[in-house]
Image (cartoon, helix red, strand yellow):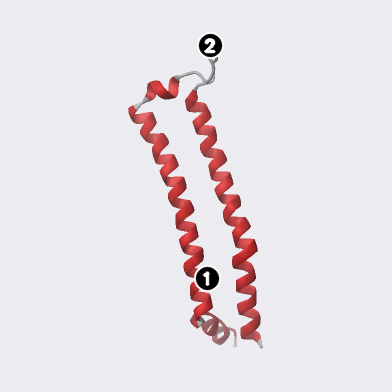
């Protein structure tokens, strides 16, 4: 019974659209994070002097620390964005699909 219901849901075009949309959104967010992290690594490899500059004149905190912290914040924000969209759009669409196939 459960297997038949899961098969019907998996064959539904709305489910396939949902899976494609969720996957595309996940890849976009992953690409953003990859580009940001890879850019940081490239800066480390090719422009250490830029990262070593202090944020303020005479300060001890370098630009590299600030950019590294920004990467962590970016990862948290992208995760929050995915979870918010999943809760708002994907979970509701999936619940509607399951409800349609239970009837």
Whether pointer 1 and pointer 2 mark residues with C-beta atoms closer than 8 Å, the reply is no
x, y percent for residue 89 = 61, 65
Q: Name above or below for residue 86 compared with residue 59.
A: below
Name the quadrant of the C terminus.
Answer: bottom right
Q: Name above or below for residue 77 compared with residue 7.
A: above
Q: What residue sits right under mark 2 in the picture?
A: 58
Q: In the image, which disc is placed on residue 44?
A: none
- Residue at left offset 54%, top offset 20%: 61
x, y percent for residue 90 = 59, 67
* Total numbered labels placed on residues in the image: 2
x, y percent for residue 18 = 52, 71
Mark 2: give few (<14), some (14-19) or many (20+) Cα within 10 Å. few
- Residue at left offset 43%, top offset 50%: 31
- Residue at left offset 44%, top offset 40%: 37
Q: Between disc 1 and disc 2, whose residue precedes?
A: 1
Q: Residue 38 or 55: which is nearer the viewer?
A: 55
Mark 1: give few (<14), some (14-19) or many (20+) Cα within 10 Å. some
- Callout 1: helix, strand or loop? helix
Name the quadrant of the N terminus.
Answer: bottom right
Q: CA distance from mark 1 to mark 2?
A: 53 Å
- Callout 2: helix, strand or loop? loop
x, y percent for residue 76 = 58, 45
Q: What residue sits right under mark 1 in the picture?
A: 18
Looking at this view, name the residue that lies furthest to the top. Answer: 58
Location of residue 75 (image quadrant): top right
Looking at this view, name the residue that lies furthest to the left. Answer: 46
């Amino acid at each position: 019974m459960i297997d038949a219901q899961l098969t019907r849901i998996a064959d539904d075009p709305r489910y396939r659209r949902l899976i494609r949309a969720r996957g595309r959104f996940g890849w976009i967010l992953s690409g953003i994070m990859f580009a940001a992290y890879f850019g940081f690594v490239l800066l480390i490899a090719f422009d250490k002097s830029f990262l070593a500059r202090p944020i303020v004149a005479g300060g001890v905190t370098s630009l590299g620390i600030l950019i590294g912290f920004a990467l962590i914040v970016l990862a948290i924000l992208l995760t929050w964005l995915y979870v918010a969209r999943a809760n708002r759009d994907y979970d509701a669409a999936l619940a509607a699909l399951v409800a349609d196939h239970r009837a």
